[in-house]
Amino acid sequence: MTWLVPLLVLVPLLGAAVALGLLNHQKLQRAITVVVLVVALAVAATLMVLVDQHGTIVVQVGGWEAPYGISLVVDRLSALLLTVSASVLLIVLLFSIGQGLAADDGEAPVTIFYPTYLVLAAGVLDSFIAGDLFNLYVAFEMLLVASYVLITLGGSEQRVRAGTTYIVTSLIASAIFLAAIGLVYGATGTVNIAQISERMAGLPEHVQLLLHTMLLIGFGIKAAVFPLAFWLPDSYPTAPAPVTAVFAGLLTKVGIYAIIRLETIIFPRPQLNTVLLIVAILTMVVGVLGAVSQTDVKRLLSFTLISHIGFMVMGIGLGSVVGTAAAVFYTVHHIVVQTTLFLVSGLMERVGGTTSTRSLGGLLKASPLLAALYLVPAFNLGGIPPFSGFIGKLGLFRAAAIDGSPLAYATIAAGVVTSLLTLYALMRVWDAAFWRPRPAAEAAAPHASVAEPHAHLRSPEPTPLTVSEDTGKAFHPGGTVTVTDAAHASRTSPIRHGRDAAGASSRNRRTGPSPETAPTATQDGVGEAPTRVKLPRMLVGVTTVAVLGSVALTVVAGPLYGYATRAAESLESPDQYVQAVLGGGR
Amino acid sequence: MTVTLVLVIAMAVLFSCGVYLLLERSLTRMLLGFLLLGNALNLLLLVMSGAAGNPPIGKTSEGIADPLPQAFALTAIVITFAVSAFLLALIHRSWKLSRADEVEVDEADVAIGRERDEAADEDPETTTDAEQEATR
């Protein structure tokens, strides 16, 4: 079944070429893109099963034997990330198709989107199967060049500005990586990862340290690890929602994947583990503090993205099987959840017209389903128990506790604080965008402006009956506002009298609904909100699938964690990898 | 391994000029810096291939030149070429849009900083955005 492996790169690249030739046949182009990614997903899933049963699959491209030819290697870690990436790529593609179909403006050059997207997919998948450093570099360049096009899609002034930051940073990262490859070749005489792993131990300590640091910096910029992460929140948020979603989900994780390989196969000794742990703490804390201070949903999510990269670095930095296993599981969880949250933020922008928490509001009333779609991944990212975020964090903290050093305990503390602050930041978005009524600045919104004068004409006699009924039902003043507001806008009902009082109290206490009461309130709001904004069915459907997927990670957490542990076991004993690539005779 | 000193010096000069230009705000200078950096990297790859003088094809008593770094350099040149073409298009677009090829600071960042300063001036007790919003 080794012929399956090259298909992962071949099919998307050929698909991109065909799609590029069909610029004038959009439907066909779309169909090809979907089919290609479905094939890639099927191949990746098959490989995931095969690798788990029969061990690492190695393909020597063109029949040239290992140290000379190009090796494609699929071990458990690769297979797992391939499957997750292919499904995320497919989901985001469907979302972007839904958005393209729903878009009214013919301005966006969607024709170039699909071929570029396929090149991006090929780059991402190739980087997971690359068996030598130079092939990894080429895969990185493939996905980066595609991402340059995607991030400046449409070429508006803002996107060109944001794109420049991103492009220049990525160019420098690539330059450092390429220089490191040159030095590695000079030092070891090979770029094959397995052979480097064999020969690296024979090098003098300081040469090893130099190579290790250079590679780590190159990958660290891509993965957005703390001191190298400031390009990310400046560049990601301006891109179109599906593009941001796939970048956030996959591009940083490619960097994380490369760091995992670097720390396990190439440099198995704990040379820089202390540095990694310190960097992990800083990434988590600085990232989440950035998130707390943001007022734009997409920027806020970009900062949480940075901060949660710290969790993965923490797992890697522990340098044990449990730590790496937890990092792998957390990577899978984070790919799915972060992508989902960015998709949801795209929907929020569609409903509310903006992603600024200052002007968003009343989304719970406008679209209760959207509120649920936001809340589930938000809890998941924050690490509320039944969700996979909790399982991943628990695994990481357990690994750190097993490690037992003071620094490991410090990372646990930082991780706990980060989780809480993440939850706080995401709940602030919830408060501002969903919970409160639309702010006064946005009074131009139809239902708000119609409702206001009526409330002034009527004498505000509160009807005690309705108020008590409402507070009893919804637990929190915010909840009553949603119900009454919605009812008010649609029909004249006795509830309306209570609105002013409830509205005023909610404005004062708006900051305080505890996360636990929120879901019940959502349930209450769902049935009675008639002024819903109709979202395109496909967008909602796709996002729902993504949210369900992130929940499903909890359901399959047992087998998935087992898989991650087996992947980590084979990673932590690099001999297996070396033998699989170079053959058992060595 | 013997290394030609001239190549190393040339590489060092290219690297330093490239990095200097990349730190500029003008997009065109960044492009030039990137090109210099790309050439410096190609030189680095060549330097790493060992002593010069061996033939690329055919065997002599000295052996043949290592083909792998040359393949790397070729690939790197192609990638540099593609990225430069893209950067040129980007510079052109930026020029058409704003008649400037400078990279500007991130407005959203500046806006948040400014709001924060103003809030601190108006009311020193306002510490978080949430409270600030709540008072509105």
Image: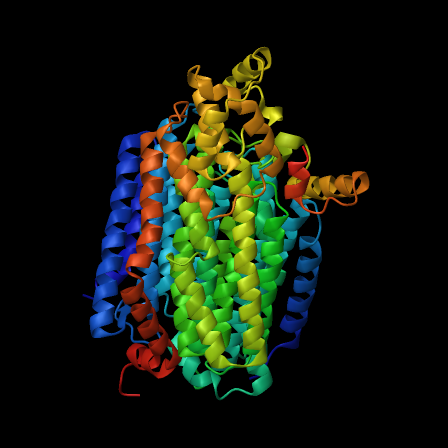
Q: Provide residue A138's location: percent of width, then percent of height.
A: 43, 60
Taking depth in this image into account, of B31 and A342 the one nearest to the observer is: A342
Looking at the image, residue B15 lies above or below residue B127? below
Q: Position of residue A524 (x, y in %)?
A: 39, 35
Q: Is residue A236 visible?
A: no
Residue A390 seen in render: yes
Q: Is residue A540 left or right of residue A230?
A: left
Q: Residue at x 51, y 59 (%)?
A: A308
Left or right side of A226 for B110:
right
Quadrant in which the C terminus of chain A is drawn: bottom left
Choose between A206 and A445: the one closer to the eye: A445
Where residue A217 sits, quadrant-wise, is bottom right
Q: Position of residue B105 (x, y in %)?
A: 69, 43
Q: Would you say A218 lies left or right of A520 here?
A: right
Front residue of A528 and A279? A528
Quadrant where the N terminus of chain A is found in the figure: bottom left
Residue found at the very far top of the displayed protein: A457
Height in image: A524 above or below A464? below
Which residue is situated farthest in the front direction here?
A464
Decide: is A160 above or below A322.
Answer: above
Q: Residue at x 32, y 33 (%)?
A: A538
Report the colour scheme. rainbow
**Horizontal and vertical percent position of residue A584:** 26, 85
Q: Residue at x 51, y 41 (%)?
A: A430
Choose top left, top right, bottom left or bottom right for residue A334: bottom left
As drawn, the residue found furthest toward the left would be: A1
Seen in the picture, residue B82 relative to A404 is either above or below; the reply is above
Q: How many marks?
A: 0
Residues A573 and A137: in front is: A573
